[in-house]
């Protein structure tokens, strides 16, 4: 049993502990007590999130706000304070831990099993964004500075190329050329954000389908989870990141690129659910959604490639070259988006009238 759990009040004595292997940053465990109550225990990676207090501040600001709005607003899990009243447990050895009660009847999908699942995922993230439409974004701490600043991500790539810490540069010439050719377009949303051409929203920033809890019987979304990266951002990022992960026909680290395609029916299903539940999106925001998909695939691929060059220090890997495979699937998706561009824009038009 992991000692950290004993620093929280639990119903019964912790008995079983199983690690849940999803996510590349934090570690997650399912704990069951002798009275059959289940908890999710998480170890927060402080290399990635050095300011755990900022992150927990955002959680409580958002949950208080949503609760005050009452019924109809997006549901949220509740973290449980430690026995001495802290929002997380500091184990004194660099580890920060937190828990919440497992949500009964909930399941987590690694991939949409039907288009309806993905439409429902869109509804969940759309509703989340809509519930926070008037949230004062200035109250949010930036848990990771410059998280979706694509200009800065290019700077980090160039630094990794210069330093070539893991001596892997020779392998990735083609990938680097691919990124440099697309730099201007990849940075377009960031520049529009800086110029104030798109509204700054409280965005989730990690909208993979496995960050939505579904009801195991009804398949309706219960709530969105993993709010560590909720920060001021663009709606197109949330839309695009969900498409990046959920509308791909293959796993994020699939080595056989022939299997990686963009599924337009899934794209449409997500767009339908997202826009239906987030009627506050402006016309400019709706028009920016396809560019959000392009930007998120490219940026995420660039982050995987940068980490590969740095020696896999950020994203957890369980085999060699996994980060390179991840980068390549993202670049294949970028090519798919370029190839299907007209369909992507007309689907948004058909779904929203814009
Ligand atoms: C990371 O750990 P996970 O899977 O929730 C990453 C996201 C990436 C994602 C790629 C804080 O999220 O930004 O899109 O991997 N989170 C952080 O799968 O960097
Ligand atoms: Mg996550």
Image: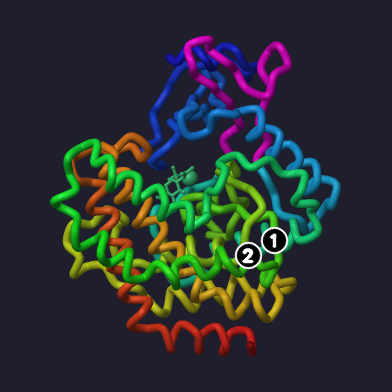
> For the residues marked 1 and 2, what is the alpha-carbon distance in whole angstroms?
7 Å
Residue ID at (40%, 35%): 20
Tally of numbered tags: 2
**Image: magenta residue range:** 77-103
Horizontal side, residue 107 vs residue 53: left or right: left
**Horizontal and vertical percent position of residue 137:** 75, 51
| Magenta span dominant secondary structure | loop
Residue ID at (54%, 23%): 97
Please report contact status of discs 1 and 2: CB closer than 8 Å, yes or no: yes
**Horizontal and vertical percent position of residue 8:** 62, 17
Does residue 117 appear in this view?
A: no
- Residue tagged by mark 1? 200
Compare residues 313 and 224 and report the one nearer the observer: 313
Does residue 337 appear in this view?
A: yes
Horizontal side, residue 123 vs residue 267: left or right: right
Numbered disc 1: secondary structure? loop
Q: Is mark 1 within 8 Å of ligand 1?
A: no
- Residue tagged by mark 2? 193
Image quadrant containing the N terminus? top left
Compare residues 330 and 278 and report the one nearer the observer: 330
Q: Earlier in the sequence, mark 1 or mark 2?
A: 2
Compare residues 304 and 73 and report the one nearer the observer: 304
The residue most toward the left is: 170
Of labels 1 and 2, the one closer to you: 2
Q: Is residue 119 magenta?
A: no
């Amino acid at each position: 049993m992991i000692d950290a759990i004993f620093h929280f009040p639990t119903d019964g004595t912790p008995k079983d502990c199983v690690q849940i292997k999803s996510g590349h940053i934090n570690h997650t465990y399912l704990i069951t007590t002798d009275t059959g109550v289940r908890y999710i225990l998480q170890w927060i990676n402080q290399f990635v999130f050095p300011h755990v207090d900022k992150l927990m501040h955002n959680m409580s600001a958002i949950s208080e706000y949503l609760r005050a709005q009452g019924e109809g607003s997006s549901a949220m899990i509740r973290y449980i304070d430690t026995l001495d009243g802290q929002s997380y447990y500091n184990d004194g050895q660099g580890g920060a831990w937190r828990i919440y009660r497992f949500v009964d009847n909930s399941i987590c999908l690694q991939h949409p099993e039907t288009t309806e699942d993905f439409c429902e995922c869109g509804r969940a993230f759309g509703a989340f964004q809509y519930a926070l439409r008037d949230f004062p974004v200035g109250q949010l701490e930036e848990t990771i500075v410059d998280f979706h600043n694509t200009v800065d991500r290019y700077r980090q790539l160039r630094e990794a190329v210069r330093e070539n810490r893991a001596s892997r540069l020779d392998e990735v010439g083609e990938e680097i050329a691919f990124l440099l050719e697309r730099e201007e377009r990849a940075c377009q949303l960031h520049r529009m954000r800086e110029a104030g051409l798109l509204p700054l929203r409280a965005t989730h920033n990690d909208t993979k389908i496995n960050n939505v809890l579904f009801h195991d019987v009804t398949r309706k979304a219960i709530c969105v989870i993993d709010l560590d990266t909720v920060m001021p951002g663009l709606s197109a990022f949330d839309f695009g990141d969900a498409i990046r992960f959920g509308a791909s026909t293959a796993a994020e680290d699939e080595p056989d690129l022939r299997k990686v395609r963009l599924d337009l029916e899934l794209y449409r299903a997500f767009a339908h659910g997202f826009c239906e539940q987030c009627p506050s999106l402006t016309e400019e925001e709706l028009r920016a959604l396809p560019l959000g998909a392009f930007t998120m695939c490219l940026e995420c691929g660039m982050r995987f490639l940068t980490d590969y060059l740095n020696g896999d220090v950020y994203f957890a890997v369980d085999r060699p070259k996994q980060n390179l495979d991840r980068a390549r699937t993202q670049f294949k998706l970028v090519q798919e988006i370029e190839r299907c561009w007209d369909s992507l824009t007309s689907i948004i038009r058909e779904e929203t009238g814009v």
